[in-house]
Amino acid sequence: IVSSFSKYFSMTGWRIGWMIVPDRLVRVMERLGQNLYISAPTLSQIAALAALDAKAECEENRKLYARNRNRLMAALSHGAFGPVAPADGAFYLYVDTAPVSNDSGELCHRLLHEAGLAATPGSDFDPHRGRSTIRLSYAGSETEIAQAAEIIEAWR
């Protein structure tokens, strides 16, 4: 099992993770790690240890993200866009924009300048099929996501 502190512990950018491997692979993984990096930054290690004691706060964040995801998905189901990929892991929704545009970069530009909504072009992630998708984050506050949902529902 390989994971990180990025999502659940809200430590994106701290570049620290963990893994569970069978005893027979521990030394192999240590050698591999020694060739990829020296070590995780000390501050990241200290913060990760503290995060392990923040279960209540992390669970509240998880519930917030779930509410935000549901609110945004509901708005998208009533808006001008197409289907939304199910979101189970990170803080993002991938939205089919084919009913509106097949140029995700141009669409993101329009959303920002016409509606004040920042989105990421799907072409940043998939140069072939990403032209008809955008990525929306639901990691903001409930107020911000509610405002974004209103914009999405009203935007044509």
Image (cartoon, grey):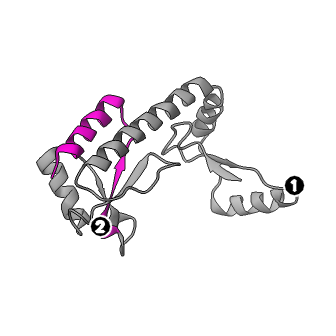
State the extent of the magenta-drawn residues as a range. Answer: 130-156
Observer able to see residue 143: yes
Horizontal relation, residue 120 to residue 38: left or right: left
Above or below residue 80? Residue 103 is below
Mark 1 or mark 2, earlier in chain: 1
Horizontal relation, residue 132 to residue 58: left or right: left
Observer able to see residue 54: no
Determine crowd level at label 2: few under 14, some 14-19, many 20+ residues with C-alpha closer than 10 A.
many
Kindly identify which numbered label has been placed on residue 111: none
Above or below residue 83? Residue 128 is below
From the image, tell me which residue sits under label 1: 23
Which residue is the extreme one toward the front? 78
Kindly identify which numbered label has been placed on residue 132: 2
Asked which secondary structure carries label 2, the reply is helix
Location of residue 6 in the rendering, given as x and y in whole percent from the top left corner: 54, 44
> What is the distance, in whole Å, between disc 1 and disc 2 at their CAs?
45 Å
Q: Residue at x 36, y 36 (%)?
A: 140
Is disc 1 in contact with disc 2, using a CB cutoff of under 8 Å?
Answer: no
